Image (tube, grey):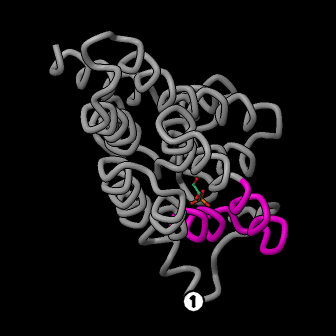
Amino acid sequence: MSLILFLFAFFFGSIPWGYIIGKLKGIDLRHVGSGNIGTTNVLRAIGKKEALITLLLDISKGAIPVLVVKIIPSYGDNLFLIGLVGIFSILGHCYTPFLKFKGGKGVATSIGVLLAYMPLAGLITILIWIITFKISKISSLSALISFALLPMNVFLLDYPEEIKFFAFLFTTVIYLRHIQNIKRLLKGTELKIGDKK
Ligand code: G3P
């Protein structure tokens, strides 16, 4: 049963909504802007409405598998299993088999997982993202700062040990997926919203 849940989470997370929305508009996001298939690049390459749809769909990819496992009677209180389901949906997004395992950076899908798995920490992460973005206008920096603070937030909120562990893991995945962004940030060449490459 757990294996079915992991496979469901991975393949649900694998649906490359940004890429699909781009293709419907005749644009291959992998060749525009940052080349990423996430909300930020949809906004850069297409527009606000499409970016919002991508954001909501990518958030749902993280939230729905976690909510599904939470309502299964024998699994719903197993915080470690729920965290594993969350990480599988995030990995599905980041390494989607539908795009030769080159997927997105996992921010929106992780936010969906957080909202379903550790709601208050999820809301705080969104708030920090918004504040950082208002100041910097840089999506990647906002993700890096808000997720850097996630392990500290779950510690301060005194979440159970399993949640602390997965918060650290989600942050690690986000950092690994933003290595190119970090290099650009250090060089001062990272794209701001409104910039096109
Ligand atoms: O959600 C991804 C974001 O953090 C960075 O996107 O397109 O600027 O690499 P992008």
Residue 20 percent coordinates (x, y): 55, 26
Q: Residue furthest front?
A: 158
Q: Residue furthest bottom?
A: 187
Q: Quadrant of the N terminus?
A: top left
- What range of the chain is rendered magenta? 127-147
| Residue 177 placement, left or right of 184 | left
Q: Secondary structure at mark 1?
A: helix
The front one of 160 and 145 is 160
What residue is drawn where x is 56% and y is 26%? 60
The front one of 179 and 42 is 179
Which of the 4 image quarters holds residue 68?
top left
Residue 22 percent coordinates (x, y): 63, 33
Residue 137 percent coordinates (x, y): 79, 68
Please name the predominant secondary structure of the magenta segment in the image. Answer: helix
| Residue 9 placement, left or right of 50 | left
Residue 21 percent coordinates (x, y): 63, 27
Picture quarter with ligand 1: bottom right
| Residue 21 placement, left or right of 81 | right
Based on the picture, tell me whether residue 171 belongs to the magenta stretch: no
Q: Quadrant of the C terminus?
A: bottom right
Tag 1 residue: 187
What residue is drawn where x is 51% and y is 62%? 150
Instruction: For label 1, count other residues whose C-alpha is less than 10 Å away and answer few (under 14), some (14-19) or many (20+).
Output: few
Tally the numbered discs: 1
Which of the 4 image quarters holds residue 98?
top left
The front one of 116 and 28 is 116
Instruction: Respond yes or no on whether mark 1 lies under 8 Å from ligand 1.
Output: no
Based on the picture, tell me whether residue 140 belongs to the magenta stretch: yes
What residue is drawn where x is 73% and y is 38%? 51
Q: Amino acid at mark 1?
A: Lys
What residue is drawn where x is 49% and y is 21%? 64
For residue 145, above or below residue 52: below
